Image: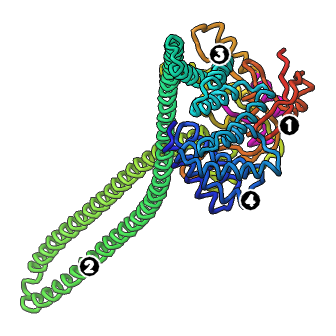
Amino acid sequence: MRFDSAEILYKDLIIKYRKEGNNSHLVRIYQKIAQAYDQNGFPEKSLFYYLSLQDIIEKAGTPQEQSLLYNNLGRQYAAMRDFTKALLYLRKAELQCAYVPCDYPEVLWANLGIALHNTGNSEQGMEYLMKARSLLTARKDYAALANLEHLITGVFFSTNDLFNALSHNEAAIQYATSTMQDDVLANAYRTAADLYHELFNFEKAFEFYRNYLDVLDSKRSKEQAREQRLNQQRTLLAASEGQIKFMIARQNFKDLEINQIKFDRERLELMSKNLELESRRKEDEVRLLEAQQDADQAKLREQTLQALEARQRLRLADQQLNAEKQGRLIVELREKEQIERSQNQADSTIRAQELERIKREQTFRKMQDGDFRRFAYILGSLFLILAMVGMAWWLARRSKQRLESQNRKIQIQNIEIQEAHRKSDELLLNILPEEIAAELKANGQAKPRLYKSATIFFSDFVNFTRLSETLSPEQLIDELNECFLAFDEICERHGLEKIKTIGDAYMCAGGLPLPNESHAIDAVRAALEMSAWLQKRKQTHPETQLNEMRIGIHTGPVMAGVIGKNKFAYDIWGDAVNLAARLEEHGEPGRVNISAATAEAVKHLFPSIHRGKKEVHNKGMVDMYFIVPA
């Protein structure tokens, strides 16, 4: 009943089909809009869309479609009180019906009768009305006869033929009562009251007018009840929308969590790369320090050798200097001795003795001075060598301590990097199968693959929408989480790959990403174990609400791979996936509904009951089987 909104949406389709030249779809849309406005009392709007149809149907429509269009146009003009144009289009419709069979000639005749009567030709109009009446009487179409008899009553009433009008009005009342048409019955009662008023039978007029009011009250009560039902439905719909919005918000929250996990994974990968770079830099620094240490030690050894060599040369030079001094002293003494011998030969003995004594004393003092100087040089050299060796040992020990500290830091960083890699791999394996994750890490992408044979499993809970209205969102999420955790464990035990959950629906598949020959058997075993788990849970926890579910399984070819660029998701596609979902929809609570392909694959282990062929949307008739429980 929201015509403006509907019309806006339909106009988008009209523009689309006009561009495509799709006349058949245009005709269907124009007819829908025109009929909606016609049935709800908007003849002007209805006429506009019927006129939009005229050009298309006159060019490409069948004679039956043209006849129906002219009849509808005539009826809309009649509703607008333009009976001249109405008669023009109704005559065109009558002409078409003269050459081709019309589906509803009585409708055309009734419309012609009314139009002729309103254009002043009441006699001919009555003939058409009577032809329509005879045809409907032969068909025993009492619902249509009620309306037609009331129309005939109006024609007779307008021509002041009150008795014929009264007779046909009584027939209209009888037919409307038997077919429970409150609108026609109320109008007939009101017409009867007017007729008896004209005949001056006021008691009858009052009686029928009271009946008219009673029918109106009953109709109003029914409309109020209908409005109450509509309000209840709107309330239920609003509650369902609230639940759906909550689920959508929950899904959005999960998407945000996944995005956060992805961001954390990327951050960890970046940190890992940074740590690798830092580790390489530290290793380079360690190698540089080791090389520097080796160079320092070599330089220290070279300096030590140079110092020892310098001290040795210094000691040799000192010894040579002492020898030269002693030689010069001897020469001086000899010269003095000769001078003294020549000057005083007389005192040669005494002086000689004195000179000998002085010589011995001088020689002794010089020898004492040379020994002390040599001892001081040796002691200083030893002390310097010991100081340099001590300094070298201290520098080597300090360098070793620094290297050990840096090695400990590098080991800790390597442990942290390994832990970050492990967490990153765990997060990736929670999102994708192990093989797909390995391919993504190795190549940066995972190409979709065609699996010629895989088994797809769908399930959902019975009456989930109704239960979601009685449970709080927290209770609903807790129950779903408990069930899906159990289903995940069962899938893992039987080698099935969980694909995704959509609301209360659970989807998994066998035979991928690693192909195997037992995927159909694995899927049926998992389905039976899930059903048994639900039954056991219902017995041990009677207060739980999600206790029954439908299961559908089909075996066939599928495409599987990773979709998305920023948000990875492993998914499967193909006609086999759609058929598995349809099998779940056509299943029964507590039963495992499988296709013929799956039944053939598991018949040696699991007997099944043929349910016959079931109509499936876009697939036609499909054979279905129930697994016989053990």
What residue lies at 74% left-to-right and 36% top-to-bottom? 509
What residue lies at 88% left-to-right and 22% top-to-bottom? 608
Give the labeled residue for mark 2: 323
- Between circles 2 and 3, the one closer to the viewer is 3
Residue 309 image-quadrant placement = bottom left
Mark number, residue 547: 3
The kind of residue on which mark 1 rests is Glu
Which residue, as the protein is rendered here, is positioned at the far right? Answer: 604
Circle 1 crowding by C-alpha within 10 Å: few under 14, some 14–19, many from 20: few
In which quadrant of the rendered image does the C terminus lie? top right
The magenta segment: 506-527
Circle 2 crowding by C-alpha within 10 Å: few under 14, some 14–19, many from 20: few
The kind of residue on which mark 2 rests is Ala
Give the labeled residue for mark 4: 60
What residue lies at 84% left-to-right and 22% top-to-bottom? 627
Mark toward the start of the polypeptide (2 vs 3): 2
Label count reads: 4
What residue lies at 79% left-to-right and 36% top-to-bottom? 455
Mark number, residue 517: 1
x, y (%) of residue 270?
47, 52
Badge 2 element: helix
Q: Are marks 3 and 1 in contact (CB under 8 Å)?
A: no
